[in-house]
Amino acid sequence: MPSSNHTNVTLSELHLIGIPGLEALHVWISIPFCFMYVVTLVGNCTLLWVIKREPSLHLPMYLFLSMLALVDLVMSTSITPNMLGIFWLHSTAISVDACLVQMYFVHAFSVMESGLLVAMAFDRYVAICHPLRYKVILTGPVIAAIGLVMLGRGLALMTPLTCILRGYPFCQDSAISHSYCEHMAVIKLACGDTTLGTTYSILVSTYVGGVDSLLIALSYGLILKAVLGLSSAEARHKTFSTCASHVCVIALFYIPGLLSMYIERYGQDIPPHVQVLMADLYLLIPPMFNPIIYGMKMKQIRDKVVQMPRIQIPTRTPNPLLLKILPWPTPPLHNCPHLNLCPVLSPD
């Protein structure tokens, strides 16, 4: 693996080594990673297509779901093709600028996804606890404002970190012990005092993960309180099932993400491949499951997917010469309830 000794020369090219300690298994690890990426592309693109095509789905919850699908596509595409290039082609080289751009997109869109999960939890709270005021509270301008705030927050929080890292000279070992440009792994390669970058990174991650997860827990707690007051056991069971699946996907996003960052910073005794795998999976699993859990479990979207246009085999036009040879009429087979029992007409 390309690397360099400590010098006073600023590096212009870095090398992602993939999953440290598991290099011999890269080809096998790439199979589930590729599968998850394909499912992510198909699921989220299908979801966007169905929601855009059906005017009846232009409601707040589906608009938030569209935003989440777009963020998932960008977040997954920012890292997965590059990781597969490392696993399959041993394409490890990446310039410092490209590495910082990848880091910016990955973490900025991770912050956006976290904010959208909060918005969707709030949407569910309003829909269940205040159904009569749902369309009054979540109007089109309000939804657009929430989306812009989530976008602005992600960009605003990650821009300072990227600028801080860009100001550091990279003169340590050129090998990044990761499969993508994760901020804590990149900071380790910088020379000089990196306290500012490390502290800012930990504070932002803790703020986003802590505050957003608390807001989500509060929303679902209020939903749970309202559901327990329902008289219908079927309605309670349905709501519990939906909320439980949502909470599981949310936990898969927050827990591995925060653990991987803290392990990278403080977990010196934990094998590096454990931290890298957790950081990879928190960016791969939620985007794969989000369109399934949030989308396909909704009857409205499931019905629209089932009704998607299918490829139709065109019928062949009869040859005019054959019609002259066989002048008698042929029965309309498509109107016959039992095709095998349809009468065969003859000239007689």
Image (spheres, grey):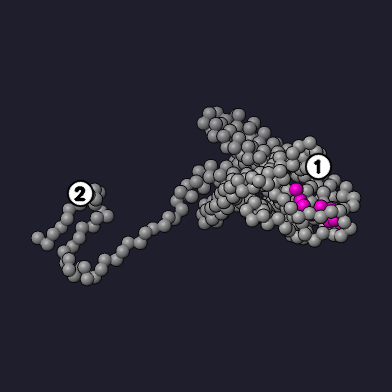
In this picture, residue 86 sits left or right of residue 307: right
Mark 2 falls on what kind of element? helix
Which residues make up the magenta segment?
Answer: 168-177
Magenta stretch secondary structure, dominant = loop
Within 10 Å of the Cα at label 1, are there few (<14), some (14-19), or many (20+) other Cα atoms?
some
The reply to whether discs 1 and 2 touch (Cβ–Cβ < 8 Å) is: no
Question: Three-letter amino acid code at disc 1?
Answer: Arg
| Residue 87 x/y as whole percent | 64, 51
Of callouts 1 and 2, the N-terminal one: 1
Kindly identify the amino acid type of the residue bearing the numbered disc 2.
Answer: Leu
Above or below residue 103? Residue 269 is above
Dividing the picture into quadrants, the one containing residue 48 is: bottom right
* Residue at position x 24%, y 70% in the image: 320
The residue identified by callout 1 is 265
Q: Is residue 288 visible?
A: no
- Locate the C terminus and report the quarter of the image it occupies: bottom left
The image shows residue 277 at horizontal and vertical percentages of 68, 43
Judged from the image, the secondary structure of the residue bearing numbered disc 1 is helix
Disc marking residue 233: none
> Is residue 170 on the magenta stretch?
yes
The residue lying toward the viewer, choosing from 94 and 67, is 94
For label 2, the residue is 341
- Examine the structure image and report whether residue 25 is included in the region drawn in magenta: no
User: Which residue is depicted at the point 76% across and 55% down?
Assistant: 2
Q: Residue shown at 62%/53% (left/top)?
A: 88
From where the camera sits, is residue 6 visible? yes
Residue 54 percent across, percent down from the top left: 51, 54
